[in-house]
Image (spheres, rainbow, N blue to C red):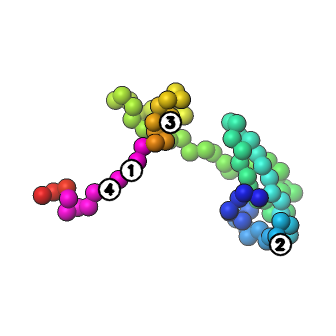
């Protein structure tokens, strides 16, 4: 189970694990837009609704050639460039001499 969040996706109840065994829920893998999403659901929430709900992938926007566009709409090369970008911050002392 490659999920580090051991809480129910729907109600946030703590999921109890005993090694690889889940005591009070289920481990589910959903596929959304070709990506696999792993979540835990407690037994009560799973019995109410087996589907993945309350999930929306965050849409990231960035500037490219003067336009603000969703990164998901960029071509492969531009997406790779975006992934390789590095953020940095400057201290207040270094910017205003």
SS assignment for the magenta stretch, majority = loop
Q: Are marks 3 and 1 in contact (CB under 8 Å)?
A: no
State the image coordinates of residue 44 (x, y, percent, origin top left): 84, 63
Lower position in the chain sequence, tag 4 or tag 2: 2
Mark 2: few/some/many CA within 10 Å (<14, 14-19, 20+): few
Is residue 22 in sight in this rendering? no
State the extent of the magenta-drawn residues as a range.
85-94
85 vs 58, nearest the viewer:
85
Mark 2 lies on residue:
18
For the residue labelled by badge 4, is the local secondary structure a helix, a strand or a loop?
Answer: loop
Q: Which mark is residue 89?
A: 4
Task: State yes or no: discs 4 and 2 in contact (Cβ < 8 Å).
Answer: no
- Report helix, strand or loop for mark 1: loop
Image quarter where the C terminus lies is bottom left
Marked residue nearer the N-terminal end (2 or 3) = 2
- Give the mark count: 4
Q: Earlier in the sequence, mark 1 or mark 2?
A: 2
- Report the residue marked by disc 3: 80
Closer to viewer: mark 2 or mark 3 = 3
Residue 32 or residue 46, whichever sits in front: 32
Residue at the location (39% across, 31% down)? 64
Which residue occupies the extreme left position in the image?
A: 97
Task: Say whether marks 1 and 4 touch (CB < 8 Å).
Answer: yes
The residue pinned by badge 1 equals 87
Tell me the SS state at disc 3.
helix
Q: In the rendered image of this protein, does residue 86 appear above or below residue 63?
A: below
**Mark 3 crowd level (few <14, some 14–19, many ≥20, 10 Å Cα):** few
Within-10-Å neighbours for mark 1: few <14, some 14–19, many 20+: few
Quote the CA–CA distance across marks 4 and 3: 22 Å
Q: Which of marks 3 and 4 precedes in the sequence?
A: 3
**In which quadrant is the N terminus drawn?**
bottom right
């Amino acid at each position: 189970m490659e999920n580090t969040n051991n809480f129910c996706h729907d109600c946030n109840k703590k999921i109890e694990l005993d090694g690889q065994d889940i005591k009070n829920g289920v481990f589910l893998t959903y596929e959304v837009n070709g990506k696999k999403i792993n979540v835990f659901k407690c037994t009560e929430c799973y019995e109410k609704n087996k589907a993945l709900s309350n999930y929306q992938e965050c849409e990231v926007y960035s500037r490219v050639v003067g336009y603000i566009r969703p990164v998901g709409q960029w071509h492969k090369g531009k997406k790779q460039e975006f992934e390789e970008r590095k953020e940095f911050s400057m201290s207040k002392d270094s910017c205003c001499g």
